Image: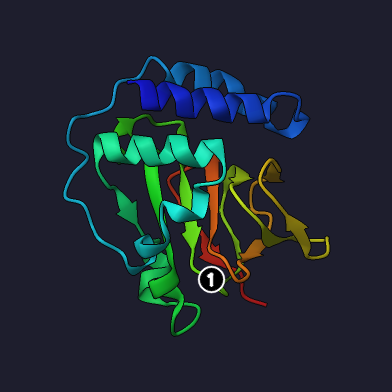
């Protein structure tokens, strides 16, 4: 599938030369040889989808992700922990993710998750953590925070690394925030909001 190869090639190119991300490259190579299922399951429409694909349109990785979604169909989701206990009254209207590869995704793999996080404008995704190691590749500007560091602006082209169980947060500005994510390690446990 051309869209899949373009997406994986673009991700690998962006990760090249980033020491913290190097461990993900062999798994990305393996994904090129993993076929997608024709039907990923019943699509769920989420309110945040109104911001996609415009949120990633200016980044080549965003265009590849949009082509992938169009070729295979939607597999948008929300973290069940956040659905049960939303961190704010409007969070679920402005949050969702599209999973491409993972245990329940169209490309079935057990050791990796690959997808797209999408936040509507002016949305804080509060401090949270998970046992998986994570890489984010923003497709546009947004503010990012990691435990022990200050908030900082990141733009398309950045590679953001979160070790396992490291608290982190992000916030969109006037525009939606879209970012490709990769998880490896203990990928079954969903993220939880960090409580002070």
Residue 106: % across, % down = 28, 35
Q: Quadrant of residue 51?
A: bottom left
Question: In this orientation, does residue 144 appear?
Answer: yes
Residue 102 position (above or below residue 56): above
Residue 173: % across, % down = 63, 69
Query: 11 or 193: nearer the eye?
Result: 11
Task: Tell me the quadrant of the picture where the N terminus can be found.
Answer: top left
- At horizontal 36% and vertical 36% (from top left) the residue drawn is 67
- Secondary element under disc 1, as helix, strand or loop, is loop
Q: Is residue 110 left or right of residue 180?
A: left
Question: In this orientation, does residue 113 appear?
Answer: no
The coloring applied to the image is rainbow
Q: Residue furthest bottom?
A: 89
- At horizontal 36% and vertical 60% (from top left) the residue drawn is 49
According to the picture, the residue beneath numbered tag 1 turns out to be: 121
Please tell me how many numbered marks the rendered image carries: 1
Residue 59 position (above or below residue 54): above
- At horizontal 60% and vertical 22% (from top left) the residue drawn is 25
Residue 7 position (above or below residue 88): above
Q: Residues within 10 Å of mark 1 (few under 14, many from 20)?
A: some
Residue 53: % across, % down = 41, 51
Q: Is residue 119 left or right of residue 107?
A: right
Q: Is residue 13 left or right of residue 64?
A: right
Q: Quadrant of residue 39?
A: top left
Residue 126: % across, % down = 60, 71
- At horizontal 32% and vertical 30% (from top left) the residue drawn is 108
Q: Residue furthest top?
A: 33
Task: Tell me the quadrant of the picture where the C terminus can be found.
Answer: bottom right
């Amino acid at each position: 599938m051309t869209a899949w190869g373009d997406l994986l090639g673009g991700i690998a190119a962006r990760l090249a030369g980033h020491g913290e991300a190097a461990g993900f490259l062999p798994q990305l190579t393996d994904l090129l040889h993993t076929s997608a299922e024709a039907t990923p399951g019943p699509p769920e429409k989420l309110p945040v989808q109104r911001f996609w694909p415009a949120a990633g349109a200016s980044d080549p990785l965003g265009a590849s992700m949009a082509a992938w979604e169009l070729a295979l169909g939607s597999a948008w989701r929300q973290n069940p922990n956040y659905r049960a206990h939303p961190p704010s009254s409007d969070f679920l209207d402005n949050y969702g993710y599209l999973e491409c590869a993972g245990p329940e995704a169209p490309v079935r793999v057990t050791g990796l998750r690959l997808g797209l996080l999408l936040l509507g404008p002016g949305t804080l995704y509060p401090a949270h953590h998970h046992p998986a190691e994570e890489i984010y590749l923003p497709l546009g500007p947004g503010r990012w925070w990691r435990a022990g560091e200050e908030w900082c602006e990141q733009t398309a082209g950045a590679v953001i690394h979160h070790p396992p169980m490291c608290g982190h947060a992000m916030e969109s500005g006037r525009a939606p925030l879209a970012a490709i994510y990769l998880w490896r390690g203990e990928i079954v446990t969903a993220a939880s909001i960090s409580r002070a």
